[in-house]
Image: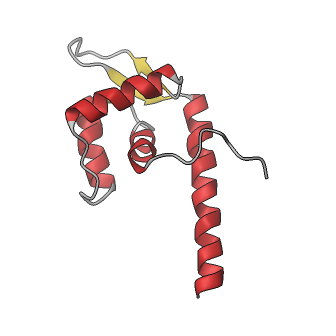
C-alpha cells in the first residue's frame, strides 16, 4: 500500500475538510466542527483562518461565490476529497487492526 505524504491529518484538519463537504464560511465551520465532534473540538477564530489559508494554499479547499460579500465561503476540492478519502481509509484500517487484535 502506497503511503500518502499528506497523511496523517490533524483532527482539526480532518474535521474542517468534513465540514466543507458543504459550502460554509469560517464561523459556520467552527460551529459545524464543534457539532461533528460533540463539542470535543473547538476551534478559535485565529486558528480557523490560519487553517483555511493553509488548506487553500494546498488546493484542498476553494472559495465559492456567496451572496454575502463580507464572508468568504469555502468548499472542499476534488484534491481535498482525495486526501480526505485516503485519511478515512487509513483510519478505517487502523480501527480494523485494533479491533482484530484487541477484541
Name the spot of residue 60 as percent of width and height, x first.
52, 29
Q: Residue at x 59, y 30 (%)?
A: 78
Q: Residue at x 72, y 47 (%)?
A: 3
Specify the farthest residue to the top. Answer: 69
Name the spot of residue 93 as percent of width and height, x first.
65, 64
Q: Residue at x 25, y 43 (%)?
A: 43
Corner quadrant of residue 48: top left
Q: Residue at x 26, y 15 (%)?
A: 67
Quarter of the image where the C terminus is located: bottom right
- Left or right, 36 with respect to 77, comes to left
- Left or right, 3 with respect to 67, comes to right
- Left or right, 81 with respect to 70, comes to right
Specify the farthest residue to the bottom. Answer: 103
Along the viewing direction, whichever of 50 and 92 lies nearer the viewer: 50
Corner quadrant of residue 68: top left
- Left or right, 40 with respect to 21, comes to left
Amino acid at each position: 500500500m502506497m503511503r500518502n505524504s499528506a497523511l496523517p491529518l490533524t483532527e482539526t484538519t480532518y474535521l474542517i475538510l468534513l465540514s466543507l463537504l458543504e459550502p460554509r464560511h469560517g464561523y459556520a465551520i467552527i460551529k459545524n466542527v464543534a457539532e461533528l465532534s460533540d463539542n470535543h473540538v473547538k476551534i478559535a477564530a485565529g486558528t480557523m483562518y490560519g487553517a483555511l489559508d493553509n488548506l487553500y494554499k494546498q488546493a484542498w479547499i476553494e472559495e465559492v461565490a456567496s451572496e454575502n460579500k463580507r464572508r468568504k465561503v469555502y468548499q472542499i476540492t476534488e484534491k481535498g476529497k482525495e486526501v480526505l478519502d485516503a485519511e478515512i481509509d487509513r483510519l478505517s484500517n487502523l480501527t480494523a487492526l485494533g479491533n482484530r487484535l484487541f477484541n
